[in-house]
Amino acid sequence: MPKKNSIDAIYQPILPYLTRVQRNIRREIRVENKTVSKIVDYLFQTKGKLLRPALAIFAGKAVAGLEDESTDEALVQLATAIELIHNASLVHDDILDDAGLRREIPTLNKIYNNHVALLAGDVLFTEAFYLMTHHLRQEIIEPITKITSGMCQGELINELYPGDNLDFSTYLTVITLKTAGLMSGATQAGAKVFGAPQVVVDALGEYGRNVGLAYQIVDDYVDDETGSIEGFSLDYAFKAAESARESLKVLSPSIYKDKLLDIVDLFIEMAVQKDMSATVKLP
């Protein structure tokens, strides 16, 4: 029995969806060429939090009215695409940061080289957009494409302000474009799958943005990566978490709304315990 506020307990209502997402990813990354398939498959050998697809699914289910197979399938395809985009961005980040480890295993750029890793990340990006264009309506795809551009812009800004040159304001700009941007896109698009009113889509987008800010600030704090950021404030994560909670007041009561609130509480607990190691265990 998972702890009440553990990641496994929070994800319990959507585990069947996340299992389908995981299966979908395995199918999508098995390209024809065995060598390429082996390289790309390596990126999904370790367990993660599956946070971004979970946010998309929770947001969609929190606004869902009458459900059918087509909307459920669209939600799974969206969540799959978002996780592929997230992992593609991690591969590219590892190249730029010259990182040697990711989730405690060697990065692709260290096993092969930067050129191979770059192209593998590109494969994930193209597979993500293939999925979206074949399974999702244009209005669902739009926020994801805009946010993917924003993620690249955030990394460009980060490259211009390396190391000791990064102040807290610039840091916030970068993580707003990158981590917060993708989480906001995930929650907006999840709501759009079920045709939510724009006021609800906007509120869930704000929730995703603030959750992303809180998550990244806590993650960097736990990893001791904030010492060189002038004016860094962990308090900002707590404020963002409170704003995320406020955004959800527009939603009707449901188990999915409760779980979105639990995700916020989990990040705050991770900050207090200084531990971000939790991963989800799928059936």
Image (cartoon, rainbow, N blue to C red):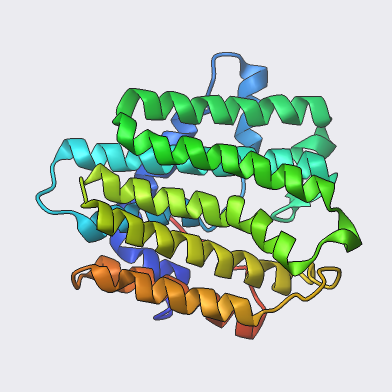
Image position of 155 with respect to 70: above or below: below
Residue 198 on image: x %, y %? 26, 51
Q: How far across and down, in percent of the image, does residue 246 sit? A: 37, 76
Q: Is residue 64 left or right of residue 28?
A: left
Is residue 178 depicted above or below 164 in this figure?
Answer: above
Residue at horizontal 35 percent and vertical 60 percent from the top:
204
Q: Is residue 220 above or below residue 91?
A: below
Residue 85 horizontal/vertical position (percent): 54, 39
Q: With 109 as the anchor, is 207 left or right in this view?
A: left
Q: How many marks?
A: 0
**Which quadrant of the figure has residue 137?**
top left
Q: In the displayed orientation, state which residue is furthest to the left.
A: 66
Image position, residue 256 (x, y; %): 27, 66
Q: Residue at x 47, y 27 (%)?
A: 129
Location of the C terminus (image quadrant): bottom left
* Residue shown at 52% from the left, 73% from the top: 240
Quarter occupied by residue 104: bottom right
Residue 23 visible, this angle: no
Q: Is residue 127 left or right of residue 65?
A: right
> Is residue 91 found left or right of 57 in the rendered image?
right
Q: Quadrant of the N terminus?
A: bottom left
As drawn, which residue projects farthest toward the top? 33
Q: Residue at x 75, y 37 (%)?
A: 108
- Residue 37 visible in the picture: yes
Residue farthest to the bottom? Answer: 272
